[in-house]
Image (cartoon, rainbow, N blue to C red):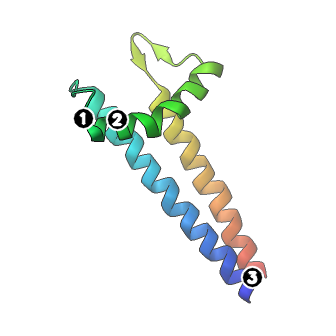
Amino acid sequence: MVIATLIEAIANILHMVINIYIWVVIIAALITWVRPDPYNPIVQILYRLTEPVYAFIRRYIPTVISGIDLSPLIVIIALQFIDLFLVKLLFALAASL
């Protein structure tokens, strides 16, 4: 019973963190359209949160098509897959205990 509750709590926290990061990616992608001040602290935080993940994806997958960078879309799809697969798997594991 305690282990099942712990696994459910971990699954809920993972789900929440994934959703927050998806919104960070969306906001960072939208901000790039308006060319903000690169010295703005919010822009720097968004850059530091998203650029390492984008760089990792760009290393293995060509993401620029016709001048449009698809890295944010790939990150969102991967995070949605993790959310739908891993989090649901953790909830199923907790229900079976």
Task: Please tell me which residue is depicted at 39% across the width and 45% down the height of the picture.
Answer: 24
The kind of residue on which mark 1 rests is Asn
Label 3 to label 1: alpha-carbon separation: 44 Å
56 sits left or right of 31 in the view: right
Say which element carries label 2. helix
Badge 3 density bin: few <14, some 14–19, many ≥20, Cα 10 Å: few
User: CB under 8 Å between callouts 2 and 1?
Assistant: yes
What's the distance in space between the residues labelled 2 and 1, CA to CA? 6 Å
Residue 27 spot, x, y in % from top left: 32, 41
Q: Which residue is mark 1?
A: 40
Badge 3 marks a residue whose secondary structure is helix
Would you call the spot at circle 1 few (<14 residues within 10 Å), some (14-19), or many (20 or more)?
Answer: few
Dot 1 lies on which element? Answer: loop
x, y percent for residue 72 = 45, 33
Q: Is residue 79 left or right of residue 46?
A: right
Q: Is residue 64 above or below residue 33?
A: above
Q: Residue at x 70, y 64 (%)?
A: 89
Quarter of the image for residue 62 reads top right
> Residue at coordinates 41% horizontally, 10% vertically from top-left?
66
Task: Please tell me in which quadrant of the rendered image residue 95 appears.
Answer: bottom right
**As rendered, which of 55 and 1 lies closer to the eye?**
55
Q: Which residue is mark 3?
A: 3
Q: Amino acid at mark 2?
A: Gln
Q: Earlier in the sequence, mark 3 or mark 2?
A: 3
Judged from this view, the residue extending furthest toward the bottom is 1
Pick out the residue farthest to the right: 97
* Quadrant (top left, top right, bottom left, bottom right) of the N terminus: bottom right
Residue identifier under label 2: 44
User: Mark 3 belongs to which amino acid?
Assistant: Ile
